[in-house]
Amino acid sequence: MASCDPAAAGSLSEEFAVPAHVEEVRSVMEAFAVQHGAAGRRVVLITSGGTKVPLESRTVRFLDNFSSGRRGASSAEYFLSQGYAVIFLHRQRSLYPYTRLYTGVNLLDCLTLDTVQEGTGLVTVDQTKLPNITEVLKRYQAVKSAGLLLPVEFSTLSEYLHLLKAAAQALSSIGSKAMFYLAAAVSDFYIPASEMPEHKIQSSNGPLQISMKMVPKILKPLVKDWAPTAFVISFKLETDPSILLERARCALDTYKHQAVVANVLDTRHGYVVVVTEDSQTELVLTDEEAQREVEIEDKIVRNLSHAHTQFINQKV
């Protein structure tokens, strides 16, 4: 069988530039984790959205993937409802908890300006165009006022890798109360800075041929070195269902983390398998649940929250 880990690496390559703000963000995440850990609360780091891979130093073109961040954003809401504090490490302009329910809605079409007097006015919301907005707004404001949601943005692959490492270091102080829910769609390939053209690639030069390197597998140092006592979940997406469970178990064997959420592209919104060292649990949305707009992420989060409880109890 082919190697499960063709590009393992123990540390970040020098090819990935360190963002200028990474230490500042690490300090903020650490304070967030310490505060909620001291309050007896668990903290989950959720990664969400895709990663952008530049083709030029002065980037005009880049490689991307289809990820909208739907799974990460919806999961954040369900973890909050389970009592977790959430660090939401998300791709810039990807879906966001609570507002994700209204993606595609033109906000200005939902608002009406009632003129009271010249130069002033009262803005009203057409709630038929923003269904359940009152209840959603209440939940969001409760989370915000309690300081339970810490958003951290990334754009490029390099930013993601360094911010994930910073998050692992920040959460190390709360031990087994920390969970890593790695739902971001991270690129497997990149162009090293030393091989990247500085300026825009000219189409007049003819057809483009690109040679890319494998991205170091950040899961290995995360589990082994950066957050060795945390509860870590990775995701495995395949288009071929026949290899799904094999690839999930291969990941568990290689990285020694706690769980893999395995799913197939075409059925990912209604069916997943949670794979652990000694079990595999199918989570399925029934037709009746789909009609009631139940989301598969609700079932995923409930399953993993229970597993996290068992994990913590084993560490005591």
Image (cartoon, rainbow, N blue to C red):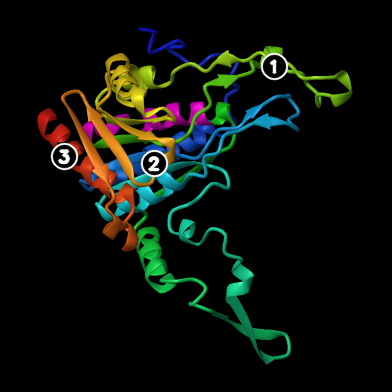
Residue type highlighted by circle 2: Arg
Q: Residues within 10 Å of mark 3 (few under 14, many from 20)?
A: some
Q: Nearer the viewer, residue 237 or 121?
A: 237
Mark 1–mark 2 Cα distance, whole angstroms, equals 31 Å
Residue labelled with disc 1: 210
Q: Position of residue 220 (x, y in %)?
A: 37, 17
For image coordinates 44% across by 36% down, the residue present is: 265
Q: Position of residue 31 (x, y in %)?
A: 37, 41
Residue 64 sits inside the magenta stretch = no
**Is there a contact, CB below 8 Å, between mark 2 and mark 3?**
no
Task: Judge from the rendering whether residue 159 lies leftward or rightward of residue 263; answer left or right.
Answer: right
The part of the chain drawn in magenta is: 160-176
- Quarter of the image where the N terminus is located: top left
Q: Can you tell which quarter of the image residue 46 is in? A: top left
Residue labelled with disc 2: 268
**Which label was assigned to residue 309?**
3
For image coordinates 48% across by 77% down, the residue present is: 127
Task: Judge from the rendering whether residue 262 lies leftward or rightward of residue 48; answer left or right.
Answer: left
Task: Judge from the rendering whether residue 211 lies leftward or rightward of residue 230; answer left or right.
Answer: right
N-terminal of the two: label 1 or label 3?
1
Check the image and name the residue furthest to the right. Answer: 204
Residue type highlighted by circle 1: Ile
